[in-house]
Image (tube, helix red, strand yellow):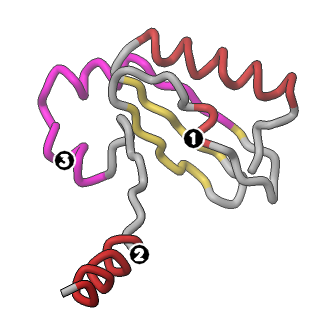
Amino acid sequence: MNHHLGLQFIMISSVKIIKNAGSLSESDLVLLAGTDIILNMLRNRILVLVEKKQVCDWSKLTEGMIGFYYIRTIDLKSNLFQLWFELPTDLETFEKNLTMAKIAGTVYE
């Protein structure tokens, strides 16, 4: 019986939980079409141009978000992204996080 429990533990320990917080996917947007959430997100958008050959640390930049947000790739070659936020305060939080990350030099992974 101990052997079975050991095997169960090994199987469970190989599962990794990735926190998704309020990040939405394309399919989520389809499900939310026509709702107030989407209307709010359309009002709270920002374009972000990332230095070429750099990868943003999106988890750091979206830290402290309360509502939903969506990161849309506009142009992968030029690293242009559009971010949608459900709440205007989350847009402000993102801008503050970006400013602090620029000062600390931690915008990129």
Q: Position of residue 65 (x, y in %)?
A: 45, 23
Question: In the image, is residue 49 part of the stretch drawn in magenta?
Answer: no
Report crowding for label 1: few under 14, some 14 to 19, many 20 or more residues within 10 A (C-alpha). Answer: few
User: Which residue matches tag 3?
Assistant: 30
Q: Helix or strand or loop: what does disc 2 sit on?
A: loop
User: Which residue matches tag 1?
Assistant: 59
Vertical order, 1 against 40 (above or below): below
Picture disc at residue 14: 2
Query: Which residue: 41% across, 25% down?
Result: 85
**Location of residue 39 (image quadrant):** top left
> Of tags 1 and 2, which is closer to the observer?
2
Q: Amino acid at mark 1?
A: Ser
Along the polypeptide, which appears first: circle 1 or circle 2?
2
Report crowding for label 3: few under 14, some 14 to 19, many 20 or more residues within 10 A (C-alpha). Answer: few
> Of tags 3 and 1, which is closer to the observer?
1
Query: Which residue: 47% across, 25% down?
Result: 45
Q: Which residues are magenta?
A: 26-48
Q: CA distance from mark 2 to mark 3?
A: 32 Å
| Circles 3, 1 touching at the beta carbon (< 8 Å) | no
Q: Main secondary structure of the magenta part?
A: helix
* Quadrant location, the N terminus: bottom left
Along the polypeptide, which appears first: circle 2 or circle 3?
2
Report crowding for label 2: few under 14, some 14 to 19, many 20 or more residues within 10 A (C-alpha). Answer: few
| Circles 2, 3 touching at the beta carbon (< 8 Å) | no
